[in-house]
Amino acid sequence: MLFKKEKGLTLIELLIVIGILAILMAGIIVAVNPARQFSQARDVQRLSNLQAILSAITQNMVDNRGTFNCAAGSIPTITTTMGSAGGGYNICACLAPLYLPSLPFDPSAGVYADCSNYNTGYQISQNTATGRITVVAPAAELGPISATR
């Protein structure tokens, strides 16, 4: 019996395998879409921050018999950015550190050093007719996010 000695992979077979792997990897990357996953994660963080701010405002109101007590004055009736500079509503001293350890800020548009130097990147307003407070994250990547209480 004569046995034929087998050879290794030919160059064409190797190129075909590499091509198939490249197509599969491209399909997986498109399906997973890491940029969109990171955008969704930042938007979830924004929503969590908005809820935390509203909860702190509610706690302040509970402690003050239904009235929001803040040295910056009442919550504006027009949508205003929460920040210490540039005409923003300076809400930090009213909430941090008593109701929040530090004021939450937008993960890509905000900055927080302390209550004298911050810009949350979020906006706040109060409806005069209903008294409801709305906090908005306008820089959200998948569309503006708002929470009202």
Image (cartoon, grey):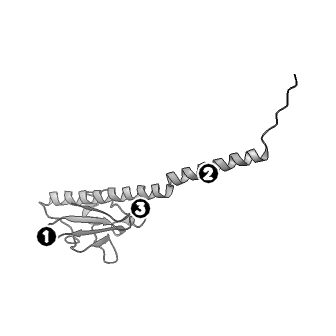
Which of 130 and 108 lies nearest the eye of the viewer?
130
Which of 36 and 83 lies nearest the eye of the viewer?
36
Of all residues, the one furthest to the front in this rendering is 1
Q: CA distance from mark 3 to mark 1?
A: 32 Å
Q: At which x and y percent is residue 98?
A: 25, 57
Q: Judge depth for marks 3 and 2 and give the one in front.
A: 2
Quarter of the view holding residue 40: bottom left
The residue that label 2 is drawn on is: 23
Of all residues, the one furthest to the right in this rendering is 2
Q: Amino acid at mark 3?
A: Pro
Q: Judge depth for marks 3 and 1 and give the one in front.
A: 1
Q: Please give left or right for residue 17 compared with residue 27 in the image.
A: right
Pointer 1: residues within 10 angstroms few (<14), some, or many (20+)?
few
Q: CA distance from mark 2 to mark 1?
A: 58 Å
Comes first in the chain, label 2 or label 1: 2
The residue that label 1 is drawn on is: 129
Q: Please give left or right for residue 2 compared with residue 98 in the image.
A: right
Quarter of the view holding residue 133: bottom left
Q: Which mark is residue 93?
A: none
Q: Secondary structure at mark 1?
A: loop
Q: Judge depth for marks 2 and 1 and give the one in front.
A: 2
In what quadrant of the picture does the C terminus appear?
Answer: bottom left
Quarter of the view holding residue 138: bottom left
Residue 112, compared with residue 76, is above or below; it is above
Q: At which x and y percent is residue 56?
A: 24, 58
The residue that label 3 is drawn on is: 107
Q: CA distance from mark 3 to mark 2?
A: 35 Å
Q: Amino acid at mark 1?
A: Ala
Q: At which x and y percent is residue 52?
A: 29, 57
Comes first in the chain, label 3 or label 2: 2
Pointer 2: residues within 10 angstroms few (<14), some, or many (20+)?
few
